Amino acid sequence: MKEMRTLGFTEREAIQAIIDLMRKQRLELPVGQVVGLELHEDPVSAELIIEDDDGKRTHLTRNAAELAASLVNYCIGRKIRLPSMSNKFVEVIAGSLNLIIYLDNVESAATKKMTRRA
C-alpha cells in the first residue's frame, strides 16, 4: 500500500522556513524587510521579495529542493514528526506552498496483525 500526506504552509510560515534555513546554512540575506513571497508552479520555485530602506527591491529565488529542505527544517524545529524513510517534495496548491510526503510501503493494520502472529 502507498500513502501520500500533504502539509500546507501559510505565506508567513513559508517565508519563515526559507529565512530560518538560510540563516542555519549561513547564507547571506539582503538587508531589508520581506514584503512578499511569489510562488511559481512550473517548475516549482519561490521568490522572496526584500525591500531595503531606500525602496530598492531584491528578489531572492529558491528552487524546489531548497524549498523542500526549508519546509522539512521548519517542521523539525517545531517538533512536527515526519517519516524519515519517505520521499518529500514541494508543490504549489491553491496558491500556497505544500510539502508532499510520499510513503512507498505502508503496512495496513491487518498486515501488521498477521506478521505478529507468525
Image: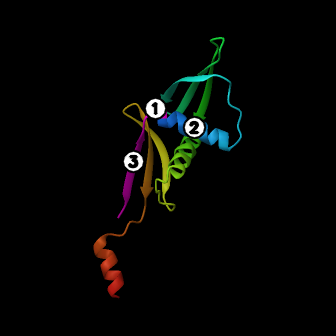
- Compare marks 2 and 1 and give the one earlier in the sequence: 1
- Pinpoint residue 89: horizontal percent, then vertical percent: 49, 47
Tell me if residue 90 is in the magenta stretch. Answer: no
Tell me the residue at 38%/54% (across/down). 4
**Residue furthest to the left:** 110
Tell me: residue 1, above or below residue 57.
below
Tell me: residue 72, above or below residue 42.
below
Q: Quadrant of the C terminus?
A: bottom left
Distance from label 3 to label 2 (Cα)? 18 Å
The scheme the figure's colours follow is rainbow
- Pinpoint residue 45: horizontal percent, then vertical percent: 53, 33
- Residue 18 is tagged as 2
- Residue 77 is tagged as none
- Residue 6 is tagged as 3
* Residue stretch in magenta: 1-12
Find numbered disc 2 in the image and state the secondary structure of the residue it sits on.
helix
Q: Is label 3 or label 1 in front?
A: 1
Find numbered disc 3 in the image and state the secondary structure of the residue it sits on.
strand
For the residue pair 24 and 88, the one nearer the viewer reads as 24
